[in-house]
Image (tube, rainbow, N blue to C red):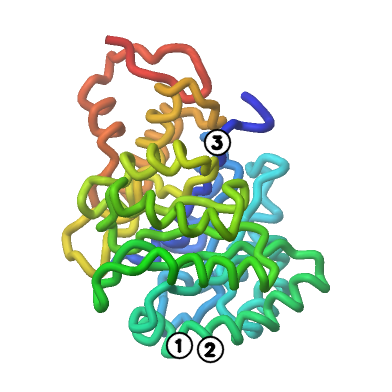
């Protein structure tokens, strides 16, 4: 297994995935979930969010969880466990729990920003500034996210220039990487590529990540398009955890299994053990009482005798 995969996959299931699931997992199950993901080869796993437990009960106990993971003998060395810290209070709590990697969220839509975090885009960026200052003083890397980079549930299509402005602002604040989120999964290569063209004018590809939801089944196509545009980092959620609060019944994040299979078929190293990842996806779905949204996992489950070709991720032999 390569120590420097050609494509980085950031696993967001334990945070972005679980916070949109109805079921609430215990701290012990959340810890086991992350340990299983790490055992499958994931090396960047969103562990939690230091937000209001009243608003996001699924993320309660993120502090004790992070402390338990730091003490876990089952977590391989070098696994990064970023956590969401939307304000200075959240950042302080995360640091007290031992966080060494944090993330902040902005939006490319004014209405979404107001509805989601009760402030304008500009106010949200001002709120993040002290977080970035504190992180810089502590030597903690900060990842930035931009929501609604293609479409907004309130405003409709979002102008690529608006996305570029927010991405540039996050870079200027000090984010080492900006993840571009198609939050409602309406993007296609025809809309994703113009957005990326605008953002690439202000940030290089190696400081960007793609975060595509699969509401309309276009996430894998958008990943391929973004890869062709130069991106080499993508967010994904095992079993497609998360749903989409703006499209009831729809799948949420692109499934990590599907990206692992995609890149294996392209001959691109990810460092992921696909059979182990599928096992992890089946396990977490059993805990949540839901089915997997991974097409690859479903196909492999239907062919229990399928032979996997050699390689870190594996491909199904015909």
Who is closer to the viewer here, 242 or 226?
Answer: 226
Placement of 119 over or under 76, stated as above or below: below
Q: Quadrant of residue 25?
A: bottom left
Q: Quadrant of the C terminus?
A: top left
Whole-percent x and y of residue 56? 41, 76
Residue 86 is left or right of residue 174, and the answer is: left
Disc 2 packing (10 Å; few <14; some 14–19; many ≥20): few
Residue 34 shows which numbered tag? none
Viewer-side residue, 109 vs 22: 109
Q: Marks 2/1: CA distance?
A: 5 Å
Q: Earlier in the sequence, mark 3 or mark 2?
A: 3
Q: Quadrant of the N terminus?
A: top right
Which residue in the protein does label 1 denote? 120
| Residue 282: percent from left, percent from top | 33, 40
Which residue is rendered at x = 39% and y = 28% of the image?
261
Q: Residue furthest left?
A: 249
> Label 1 crowding class (10 Å Cα cut-off): few <14, some 14-19, many 20+?
some
Label 1, label 3: how many angstroms apart (C-alpha)?
34 Å
Is 102 on the left-hand or right-hand side of 302? right
Sequence-earlier tag: 1 or 3:
3
Circle 3 sits on which residue? 7
Q: Secondary structure at mark 3?
A: loop
Residue at (61, 70) in percent of width and height: 63
Evaluate if marks 2 and 1 touch, with contact meaning CB atoms under 8 Å apart: yes
**Looking at the image, which residue is at 43% across and 23% down?**
266
Q: Secondary structure at mark 2?
A: helix
Mark 1: which secondary structure?
Answer: loop
Instruction: Give the quarter of the image for residue 31.
Output: bottom right
Quickly name the residue at label 2. Answer: 123
């Amino acid at each position: 297994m390569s120590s420097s995969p050609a494509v980085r996959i950031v696993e967001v299931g334990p945070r972005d995935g679980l916070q949109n699931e109805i079921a609430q997992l215990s701290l012990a199950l959340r810890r086991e979930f992350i340990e299983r993901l790490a055992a499958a080869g994931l090396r960047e796993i969103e562990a939690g969010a230091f937000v209001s437990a009243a608003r996001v009960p699924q993320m309660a106990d993120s502090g004790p969880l992070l402390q338990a993971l730091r003490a876990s003998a089952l977590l391989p060395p070098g696994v990064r466990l970023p956590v969401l810290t939307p304000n200075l209070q959240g950042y302080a709590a995360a640091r007290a729990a031992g966080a060494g990697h944090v993330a902040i969220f902005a939006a490319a839509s004014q209405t979404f920003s107001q509805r989601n975090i009760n402030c304008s885009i500009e106010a949200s960026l001002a709120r993040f500034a002290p977080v970035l200052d504190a992180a810089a003083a502590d030597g903690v890397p900060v990842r930035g996210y931009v929501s609604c980079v293609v479409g907004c549930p309130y405003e409709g299509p979002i102008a690529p220039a608006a996305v570029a402005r927010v991405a540039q602002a996050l870079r200027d604040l000090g984010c080492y990487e900006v993840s571009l989120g198609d939050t409602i999964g309406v993007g296609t290569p025809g809309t994703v590529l113009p957005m990326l063209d605008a953002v690439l004018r202000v940030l290089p590809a190696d400081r960007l990540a793609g975060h595509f939801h699969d509401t309309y089944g276009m996430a894998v196509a958008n990943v391929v398009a973004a890869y062709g545009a130069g991106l080499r980092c993508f967010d994904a959620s095992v079993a497609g955890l998360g749903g989409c609060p703006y499209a009831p019944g729809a799948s949420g994040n692109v499934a990590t299994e599907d990206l692992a299979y995609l890149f294996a078929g392209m001959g691109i190293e990810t460092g992921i053990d696909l059979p182990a990842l599928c096992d992890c996806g089946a396990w977490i779905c059993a805990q949540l009482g839901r089915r997997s949204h991974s097409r690859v996992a479903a196909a492999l489950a239907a062919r229990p005798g399928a032979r996997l070709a050699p390689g870190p991720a594996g491909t199904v032999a015909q």
